[in-house]
Image: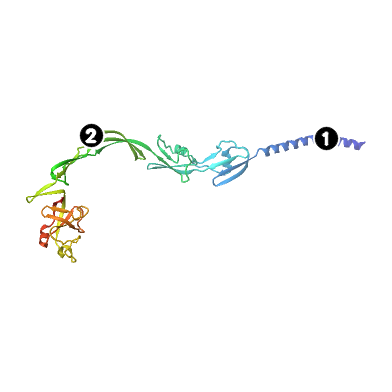
Amino acid sequence: MQNWRFSQLDKTPFIKYVPLAVVLLAVGSCAGLVVTNSRQNVVISAPDREVYLTIRPSTVKDVLNQAEISLGPGDSVYPSLDTQTKDGMRITVERAKPVFVISGDRISTVFTSERNVGKVLELAKVSLAAEDKVVPGIDQEVPPDGTIRVVKVTYGEVTVDEKLPFDTEKREDSSLEAGLVRVYREGTPGIVRVTYTVKYEDGKEVSRQEKSRVKVKDPTPRILLVGTKREVSRGGQNIRFERALEVMATAYCPCSKCCGPYANGYTHTGVPAKRGVIAVDPKVIPLGTRVYVDGYGFGVAADTGSAIKGQRIDVCFDTHEEALAWGKRKVKVFILR
């Protein structure tokens, strides 16, 4: 009977304390579950590395501090620093890079992680007028070389005096030989005052458009006298001709001094070189043409010469002395009918 009592008395404390132990164990397990579930996995993506962290709930700023990632001037982070973290969050860090803004002869450097051209210009405090040009466009991304060019477009007015061309009038003159032309009066250009609207890009003119035009002075025409006379008197003889030319005339003879060591006394056309033979440029006076040369007389275009080009002739004499005496002179040549 005593053993039973002892057993009964011994069981009482055990029964009382078992439920309390179970309760404490359950509470501890729940607390551990809460602690475990409150931790979060986040990833930090930076240009130089990626960091994987398991953290307690905090802010983006705290996570960067924990990872020892600092932000410099112009760096950016997404989400923002004051954003609360959540499980699976990806935090992106963009490092600032130099962007060069060129406007005219000025170069501004902006350190920024911003890649939109328009926003970079805002950071650089560059104001744009309506027609200013930006390369690349303000809605595009900053190019790989980090250069943005701003072309400032401006307008101005320029007034200049421009010449008005004069006309040429021809008047017949019966006292002047046919084929000859004389200037009776030189023309003078007129003046017109023109105002232009000028477009400039970075100070350089790229286009202009006429705005107004005012005539200041009228031009005066140039007046030419055109000869119509077809007959002249020389040595008491009337000479009728088709046209007259003014040429530079030299002289030669058949000798070797004038025609070289291989001179044979014959002309380019095969006729003997003698007085009355004229060397000409066939493009000006055709070979075989009968002519009258002032100061020389009648002749025939029957020879050529390497130096006889254009308005030049070479008259032939029988002797070297006569050729030397002629020399070089300006004369009229009449093309005979």
Q: Residue furthest front?
A: 337
* 222 relative to 195 in the view: left or right: left
Quadrant of residue 37 within the rendered picture = top right
Which percent across, then down, holds residue 306? 21, 59
Name the secondary structure under disc 2: strand
Q: Nearer the viewer, residue 251 or 303?
A: 303
Label 1 or label 2, whichever comes before in sequence order? 1
Residue at left 59%, top 45%? 51
Of residue 266 and residue 44, the one placed in the foreground of this image is: 266
Q: Nearer the viewer, residue 128 or 301?
A: 301
Say which mark, if any, is on residue 216: 2
Q: Nearer the viewer, residue 137 or 74?
A: 137
Tell me the residue that label 1 is attached to.
Answer: 15
Instruction: Specify the amino acid type for callout 2.
Output: Val
Position of residue 224 measured from the top left corner of the image (x, y, whole percent): 17, 42
Would you call the spot at circle 1 few (<14 residues within 10 Å), some (14-19), or many (20 or more)? few
202 left or right of 325 in image: right
Q: Nearer the viewer, mark 1 or mark 2?
A: 2
Between the residue at mark 1 and the residue at mark 2, the CA separation in whole angstroms equals 128 Å
